[in-house]
Image (spheres, rainbow, N blue to C red):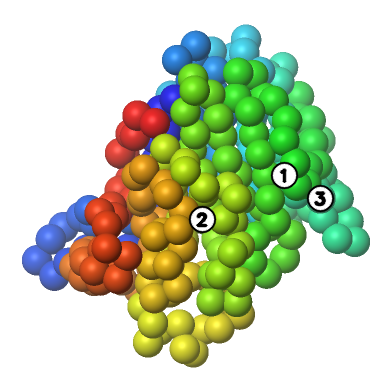
Amino acid sequence: MRATIWGCRGSLATPGEETVRYGGNTTCIELRTSDDDLLVVDAGTGIRRLGGTLFDGARPLDLVLTHLHLDHVEGLGFFAPLFDEGREIRIWGPAQDGSSLEARLRTYLSPPYFPVPFERIPSRVEFIECGPGSWTVGGVTVTAAVVQHPGDTLAYRFEADGRSFAFIPDNELGLDPESGAPLADTADLLFHDAQYTQEEYRSRVGWGHTALEDLAPFLRTSGAERVVMFHHDPSHRDSDLETMRATAEELAGREVELAREGCAYDV
């Protein structure tokens, strides 16, 4: 498998630099197997650029959502395949309390939130509600688990080609140190929420994100081969993120990487 980051949530450029090195767009991952099976994971603003590379309209496209907070779905209306007439798109996501996945996304992709009524979108969109458990999409086995984050939120483990990728972008380990642990266990690649310093977290308990001091023990016990800090805070500069990475490595006693837009990881 290869996981490519099209969005990992924004950061600010370090003073004197014109561009950011790590953040930029909000969450979107492209996942491909050795057989060229494709999964798109989350639909933040990064999905707009990804959509411009997906020209094979004859192939069904699977989009897997962790949850419906805007930073994970706000790019959906600007995803080119959605406007490819007759293209089949399957949107997988968590069941919604008091409504349905389809109803909530139809509302977002209609006026007044979006200029084009959903009924005029020319692709053929199917909504598939999912919950904890495992299923197969193309050549990928997907395992989902509920994690500690406000609202109906899932994290995933993707397995193909004899390898595993755990994607846990929004998770508050400070409220549940074991949240997401079965997904991360001995994963070949782990992307995990690492949004806050410990000082920042003290005033943000319950917001659904992880502080470095809570991340470190999780990483020590997960056994993940490669770990990437994900879901950068938009107020953090590149230099702040590099300081946070050094702190995370010191606390966890292991190498840790920073998610960088445009990076591809061979799992």
Q: Quadrant of residue 207?
A: bottom right
| Residue type of the residue flagged with mark 2 | Pro
Q: Position of residue 242 (x, y in %)?
A: 21, 64
Identify the residue under disc 1: 93
In this picture, is 257 found above or below 121? below
Instruction: Note whether residue 45 is visible.
Output: no
Q: CA distance from mark 1 to mark 2?
A: 15 Å
Whichever of labels 3 and 2 marks the residue nearer the N terminus, that label is 3
Q: Nearer the viewer, residue 43 or 145?
A: 145
Bin the neighbour count of mark 3 within 10 Å (Cα to Cα): few under 14, some 14-19, many 20 and up. Answer: some
Residue positioned 42% across, 37% down in the render: 188
96 or 137, nearer to the observer: 137
Q: Is residue 246 visible?
A: yes
Judging from the image, what secondary structure is the residue with disc 3 in?
loop
Residue in view at x 59 percent, y 64 percent: 178
Q: Which residue is mark 3?
A: 95
Q: Circles 3 and 1: CB distance less than 8 Å? A: no
Tell me the CA gap for discs 3 and 1.
Answer: 7 Å
